[in-house]
Every structure is written in C-alpha cells, then in structure tokens.
Amino acid sequence: MSGPNTGTAAPSSQNMSTRPANGPQDWDMGTKTLLDLERLDGYVAELAVSDDGGHAAAVVEKSPEERIIAVDNQPWEPALEKAWSLRFTSDGRAFALVRIDDEWTIMVDGTPWEERFEFAWNPKLAGGGKVIGVQTKSDMQYSVAVDGKLWDARFLSCRDYALSPDGSRVAAAVQIEELPEADVFKFLEGTWTVVVDEEPWPRKYLNVYTPIFSLDGKHVAAQVRTDATDYTAAIDNQPWAQVFTCIWEPRYRTGSDVLLPVRQQGGWFLAQNGKILWPSKYVQLWHACVSPQDERIAAVVATAYGRWTVAVDDVPWKTTFSDMVAAPVFSPDGHKVAAAVKHDGRWSIAVDGVPWMPTFDMVWEPVFSPGGESIATIVKENGKQSLVVNGRVHSRSFDRLWAPAFSPTGKQILLRGVDGTRVIREVIATTEV
Amino acid sequence: MDLQDQAVLDRGIDEGLEKLTPERIEKVIRHVLDNESAARLKVYLETCVHCGLCSEACHTYLSRDKDPDFAPVAKVKDTLWEMVKRKGRVDKDLLRRSARIAFTECGACRRCSMYCPFGIDIAYLIMTVRRICSLLQIVPQYLQDTTNSHAVTSNQMWVQADEWIDTLMWQEEDARDSFADARIPLDKEGAEVMYSVIAPEPKIMAQLLGNMAVIMKAANVDWTMPSADGWDNSNMAMYSGDFEVMGRVERAHWERARALKVERVVMGECGHAYRGAVYDGPKWLGWQKPPIPMIHAVEFYYELIHSGRLKIHRKITEPVTVQDPCNIVRGRGLHHKLRYVVNALCENFTDMDPRYEHNYCCAAGGGIINCGPPWKLSRMKSIRVKAEQMAATGAKICITPCHNCHSGIEDIIGHYKLGMHVSFINELLVKAIAEPQG
Ligand code: SF4
Ligand code: SF4
C-alpha cells in the first residue's frame, strides 16, 4: 500500500544520523495526537514531526496545481504550486522546498525566503540543526544559499556541498571550467574544484567528491582525482603526496587529522594524513567514523568476499554478515559500537559484534541512550513498523515511525509515528519494551 | 579484414596512443596480467585448442560473411594473446587494433562461450583487453565521455541534479493527465520498492518515467525514486574498463537504496545496468550478491500481471516480436517471463529464431553503441544476421526491454529498412492497462 512520504532520506553523502538533534523537554508519559490526517482535506504527500515530538507538519495536495503545508493542522498561507522535502529544524521550525510563481525557494515556518531560484534542492542542516543550506540554480548557473542568503559566486555545475558544523561556512564541489561536448582531453586537465565561502581552490581536478569541514570549521578536506587513475585527499587545496587507485569519503578526527579509506595493491586500507593507519588489507573498507572522544575508530569492512563486518581500531568483529553492514555508530562514551547488519536477507542490529536475535525485513540506524546502556531502533516487518530496544520488540506497531529518542536518564523513549489516521507522539518507559 | 573499419578515426584512441611510451605500455599490461587478472585468464589461454567452434556463435563473424578475423578466438588471438606472448612489449599498431576489436567488434555478449567445448569466456578475455586500454587511456572518445559523465554526475548523460528532479516532477504531472492518482514519490524512506532507471530516460525518453508512475499506481505499489545521485546504476565505466568509476557508481546506487530503507530495487528496462548493479559492481565492491534484492522490469511486470495486480484491458493487435537482451536472458534466464509478459500484452506475437539464450546480441550492447557515430557503420555491418532474423518474423513492432537493445535495434531497422518500430514493454503496458472509456 502506498502511504504518505514520512521521511525524506537526506540526499547527502555525509554521515546520516537519524537521531534527533534536539531531545524533547517534555518527558511526561502518554500519547498525544499531533495531527489528524482525516482533517487534512486532500492527498497527504509528506509528513514530518519535530525532533521533540511537539509539532507535526504535512504537505497536502488540494489539486494538481495547489499544495498547502499544514503544521499542527494549521495551513500556511498562501497555497503553493509545489512543496516537498518537508522537515523540521532542531528548534522546531518546519521548512520545505516550495515553488511559488514558478520560482523555487525555502519556506520556513510559513515564510518564504526572499531569494527565489530557478531551482533549489538538497537542503542540509547545520549549526545544531538550526541553519538551513540549499543548492540553487538560476540563469543556468549553480550556487548555494544559506538561511536565505545566496552566494554571489556562480558556477557551471555543483554536485555537492557541506556546511561547517556551526553553519557559518560552506564548501562545495563545483565545475569551474567549461567542458566542450565529449572533450575527453580537456576533462583530463581538470575542470572541477572545491569552493570554500565563495573562494575556489586554485587547483583544478578531474573530479572532486564529498567536501567536509573539520569539527572546528577551519579546514576542508575532499576526495580529489588528480589524474585518470590517481585519487587522493586534498586538504585546503593541498593534495596528499600519496595517490591511490581509488578512495572513499574522508573523515576528520577532532583536530586536523584526516582519515581516508584507500585502495592499493588490490585491497583497501585506512589511511590517516597520507600514511596507512590500519595495516590490515580488506576486500572493502568504508564509512570510517571516530568515537566522540576521538580515541577509537570504526569502519565497515569486508574481510573476504561477502563477509561484511565492522572493524574497530583495525580489529574486525568475529561475526561477519553476508549481505550488508551499514555505517557504524559509537555510544556517547565511545565504549560501544553498533550497526545495522543484514545476513541471509534479514536485517538486525549488531552491538560490539553480537547481533540481536530477532531479524526483520528492514531496520533503521541504531540510537544509543545517553549512558550507552540501551539501543533503540525502528524495524519493519510485514509492512508495519515497530520500536525495538535492546533486541526486544515493542508490542505496538505503527504505519510509520520516525527515529526514537531517549530521555537524558535513558529511562523514557520518545516515539513519533503514524497510527492509522493520527500522527502521534508517545513517551514510554524504556522498561515497557 | 575490413579496411573501411580499420580507417575509422577515433580521437580517444588515436590521440591517446600518441602519448604512450613503450615503458608505460609494458608496465600497464604487466600490471593487469600479473595483479588484476584471475587465474582463469591463464587457464583459458592455455586450454583453447583453436578449434574455431565458437565462430558460428558470433554475430559479427556471421554477419561479415564468416570473415575469420571476426571469429571470437581471432579477437583474442589478435589482442590478448599477443600481449601475453610478448610480455607487454607490444607496439602501438597492436594496441590500436586491440582497442578497435575489444571496444567495437565484441560486445561481450557471451554467446560464443556457450558453443566452446571448454566454456571459455571470450567476453572476459576481451574485457581484460578493455581494462588495459582504459589504464592506457586509449578508449573510444564517446565511450570515454560517458565514463567521464559517470565520474562527475554518477549518471551516464551529464544530467544535472536539478534537471533530474525537475523531470520527475513534470513527468508526474504528465502521468496525472492520464491517471489522476499517479505520483512519483521522491525520497520516501521505508517504501517497499526503489525504482532505478538510466540517464537516457530523463534526458531523451522522459515519458517512460511518467508511464512507470501510471503502472505503479495501477498496481498500487509502495515505491519511491531518489532525488539524489544513485538513481542511475547504468555503467558504461564497466564497459570502458574504468572499474574504479564503475565501483563508485554502483556503491552510490546501493547506498542510496539503503538510505531509503527499501526492501528491494526494481531496475527499469535496461540490461547492462542490471548487469552492473547485480554482478560486476557488487563483485568489485566485495559483495557476493547485491546487498538488497534487485529485480529487472521484466520480472516485475511478470509479477504484477501474473498475480493479477495489473489487469490487461486491451491487447496490442499489431504483429510483434521480441529481442532477448543478453544481460537478462543469457545472464539471468528471464526469457520465459519475458514471453509471458509479451503474450499477456500482445495478440500477435512471433518469436525470433534462434531465441532465448541462443538469441543474437543487438550489437549495441557491451558499450559498442556508446563508441558513437564513428563506429556506427561498422556496427551495422556486424549485425546483418539480426536484421535477417527480425525481418523473418514479419513483425511491425520489435519489443526491446533494454535501452541498448532499443537504440541498437532502432538503428538496425533504419539501416536495413525493415519497416518496423521499437518499443519498450513499459510503453505497451500503459496502453494495455488503460481502462476502456465509458
Ligand atoms: S560479440 Fe559475443 S559472440 Fe562475438 S566474440 Fe564477443 S562475446 Fe563472443
Ligand atoms: S571454441 Fe573454445 S577452444 Fe575452440 S577456438 Fe573457440 S574459444 Fe578456443
């Protein structure tokens, strides 16, 4: 059955955390209805719930030409030609990509940005989930806008961008040289670079992928292709001296150290600042991540064909999984690592190498309690979604659920979901599951 | 030997050759032979007894009046054997010939390996030659450009991110003109199905997307399409020999499917994209099988019609035939399901002969059509048998559930003046499921 789109998978190649950035203040147990879908007259195209479960919003189609956004059943004015990618900032403001008078912009809490674009897409949040960035196109030129302010700089193309953690800076992968049709020679000279706060790096590359900021926002790293068969990381436009036959996305540690999965001698290794950090050779290595204290590093690895697992500090878990292992997540104290894993067609969560007993049609990313003693996630089985905590399935199922959140003590869990025709928030005791 | 083909100028190959030194040539060939090739390469080369039984299998050989230069074994003998024998110390003439043969005279269709008493996989050996050419940067210009497009945009036709989303939106509008509730749900996390297509759809055949919105609605499928990269899993880098770009494209595709938490992926009507996503891509990335199940559109249509989720209201009356795409028939065995779907949609179906896994390739697949205009005449000369096979059916429509077959067969129809037209199943299906007016 088709239902409304209740979650916009962030089209970002950066780490995707489904954990709400801002927990709720209200931990009173019980259920509250946020939205009554029957009262929304029209086709509900998308739904979103704020991180604290205090507000719910919907994109409702009144006619093929007319959509409205309603927050807590209150429609925004005016009606829109199009609206999609509905989400909430961490401070509870609903926003979406909207088209008004044939122009696109972002509408936040019912007010559209003054800047309008031929097209806008790929919204991302930063600054603790309060700053909104978006890619734009106007007059066939590409740019980036943040909180309503468009860059003056324009580019021939832009494939991705990153906001600094505090949201004050922007880096983007941009094309800065024309490439005549099928000009395979000009391509080799490099037509792409990284632009940081409107200032392009002077060096051009064949390709640039996944720019990211250091945690302090002072540095930018990106994957660069310096020749047809040479890939490496460039930090603030300085490529590492070492090149590799293939690489994946870089990660910053807490300072300026950069991790990079690299391929050489037919295998994959984890490099740091150009040197091999993990001496083990893997069939695959990606999704490197660093513990909050910057003491441990985890990555998804394949130890052999079809044997996927997580390696922590270059030590793979003993259990491997045949199908897939999703990006690992550290507990807040950095002691535990969990990941969604798929084995023989069934999904589960593995914690420090031990998979939960029950398996599911689908699992979402694991969410740790603040103390790290509990892990919650959403699962799907026979088309219905449920909360699972520490491998135990909650007795209730929903049509849709958003990522769960633990209270600061870990004793309560906030559920946000669609139950029939109601969008609800519910606080339950962790022990209830 | 075809002197006209040998005189074809291709900047990608010719200018690439100019930059090569003997040292670089030797180094690259030895690297591929020593470090990148499976043990089976050596076994194949040592096992072949030069019996020539594979010749009769190859459409280029048959179409070119059994010219021995076009026999599968000759294609290997003239390229890889020489490289192995001379330990990489080969000259530019051999490399030019190798690039021409590997990229434009063998489509890696794998028909010949069914006829070899030892099951030697000629296509694998030819792909090794392509890998060498790719590392030496002597790839046909247009094929390389397609690979460059994959490297920059992930998709094969330089489709910009905004063009993709915009196309999905106006296709949804178009679909709703014929089916009021049709939608193209973007980024719907937790949908059952992610639908993957290849770049020619948004670029030049956008109505196929609108058609799918109608089909999905009619069958009430919970589906989604991604707004971001990973939507195109076609892979010309797989065919140009740039396995690093191939891996990047396939990873993007599978990670997008994971991010959307879909239970399976339905691949549109494309054979090589299916191959890239199900076989070559996963293997290079370390997967033994796709991380999330993928079915080809033919299997999906079969499932929807067979289960009664799609009702056929009126059948196509014009005489039709069907092309068996190599990658989903020889590669996946979907020929019976394909016949089931065609018979469900069409009243007047005549099969080709030979058929099923013995069907001839369209000569466009394997990246050949992407080598572009310089090689079109050569491609047409290599596929006369297909034209004869099609003409014998008397059909007016040739159904091609693969983008390469679609374009290749369209060229054959024009070149050999067959008086037919080509159609995807998708196009016939939307007509067949339309409820009669009144
Ligand atoms: S085109 Fe097909 S039959 Fe001919 S040599 Fe290549 S793989 Fe074999
Ligand atoms: S049929 Fe097999 S053994 Fe005979 S020539 Fe062809 S590849 Fe060699």
Image (tube, coloured by chain):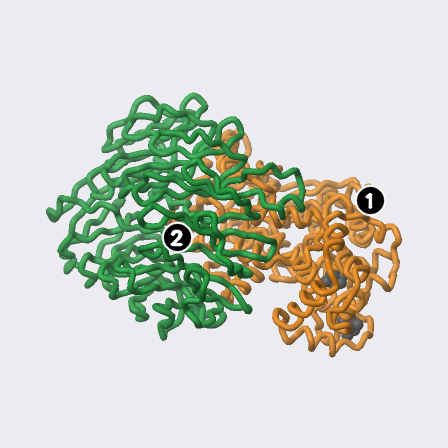
Mark 2 secondary-structure assignment: loop
Percent x, y of residue B394: 78, 46
Q: Is residue A377 visible?
A: yes
Above-or-below relation of A179 to B1: above
**Chain A: what color?**
green
Badge 1 amino acid = Tyr
Percent x, y of residue A32: 16, 42
The number of discs equals 2
Q: Which mark is residue B261?
A: 2
Q: Residue A333, located in which quarter of the rendered image? A: bottom left
Q: Chain of mark 2?
A: B
Percent x, y of residue A217: 34, 46
Give the chain ID for the orange colour.
Answer: B
Q: Residue at x 51, y 29 (%)?
A: B177
Q: Is residue B112 left or right of residue A75?
A: right
Q: Do badges 2 and 1 share one subunit?
A: yes
Q: Which mark is residue B399?
A: none
Q: Is residue B377 left or right of residue B141?
A: right
* Ligand 2's quadrant: bottom right
Percent x, y of residue B57: 78, 64
Choose the circle earlier in sequence order: 2 or 1: 2
Between A263 and A366, the residue placed more toward the observer is A263
Q: Residue furthest left?
A: A28
Mark 1 secondary-structure assignment: loop
Q: Which mark is residue B416?
A: 1
Above-or-below relation of B48 to B27: below
